[in-house]
Image (tube, rainbow, N blue to C red):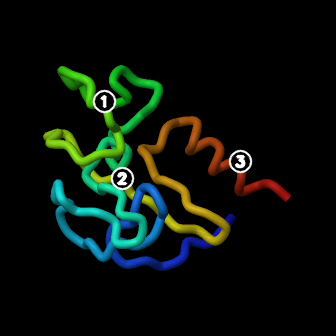
């Protein structure tokens, strides 16, 4: 299993670098490294490309540009964990992901 490298605060959904933000994410917050908007659909924990409007929440209308800041009331930042060798996002655990983690414990 790849060790998690320690980081402080929120990490950017786009580049995986630390943003320096430790509290609430505001609409005008951007990543100091890649300038990506942080309060956007792609940075939200509810973002799911397989769902209607690409959101796990029930929303009334589609947000066309998922990478631009918006006013969605459902927004919750998505945890991004920087690991040696790359960046991975942490979404809600499902039965399948828990089973895979368990199976990975016994691989040679």
Residue 42 in the image: above or below residue 17: above
Q: Position of residue 74 (x, y in %)?
A: 19, 39
Tag 3 residue: 103
**23 versus 44 height, above or below:** below
- Mark 2 vs mark 1, foreground winner is 1
| Contact, mark 3 vs mark 2 (Cβ under 8 Å) | no
Please tell me whether mark 2 sits on a helix, a strand or a loop: loop
**Which residue is situated farthest in the right direction here?**
108
Can you identify the residue that label 1 sits on?
A: 64
**24 relative position to 67: left or right:** left
Nearer the N terminus, badge 3 or badge 1?
1
Q: Secondary structure at mark 1?
A: loop
Label drawn at residue 47: none
> Residue 13 is drawn in which quadrant?
bottom left
Q: Is 61 displayed left or right of 78 in the figure?
A: left
Q: Position of residue 14 (x, y in %)?
A: 45, 56
Is disc 2 surrounded by few (<14), some (14 to 19) or many (20+) residues within 10 Å? many
Up/down of 96 relative to 62, above or below: below
For the residues labelled 2 and 1, the Cα–Cα distance comes to 19 Å
Disc nearer the start of the sequence (3/2): 2
Q: Residues within 10 Å of mark 1 (few under 14, many from 20)?
A: few
Query: Given this view, does label 3 or label 2 mark the residue nearer the observer?
Result: 2
Left/right of residue 1 with respect to residue 34 in the rendered view: right
Label 3: which secondary element: helix
Per the rendering, the mark at residue 78 is 2
- Which quadrant of the figure has residue 68? top left
């Amino acid at each position: 299993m790849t060790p998690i490298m320690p980081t402080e605060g929120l990490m950017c959904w786009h580049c995986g670098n630390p943003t320096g933000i430790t509290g609430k994410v505001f609409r005008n917050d951007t990543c100091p490294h890649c300038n990506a908007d942080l309060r956007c659909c792609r940075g939200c924990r509810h973002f799911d490309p397989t769902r209607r409007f690409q959101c796990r929440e029930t929303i009334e209308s589609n947000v066309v540009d998922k990478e631009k800041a918006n006013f969605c009331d459902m927004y919750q930042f998505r945890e991004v964990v920087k690991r040696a060798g790359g960046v991975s996002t942490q979404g809600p655990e499902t039965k399948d992901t828990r089973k895979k983690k368990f199976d990975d414990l016994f691989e040679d």
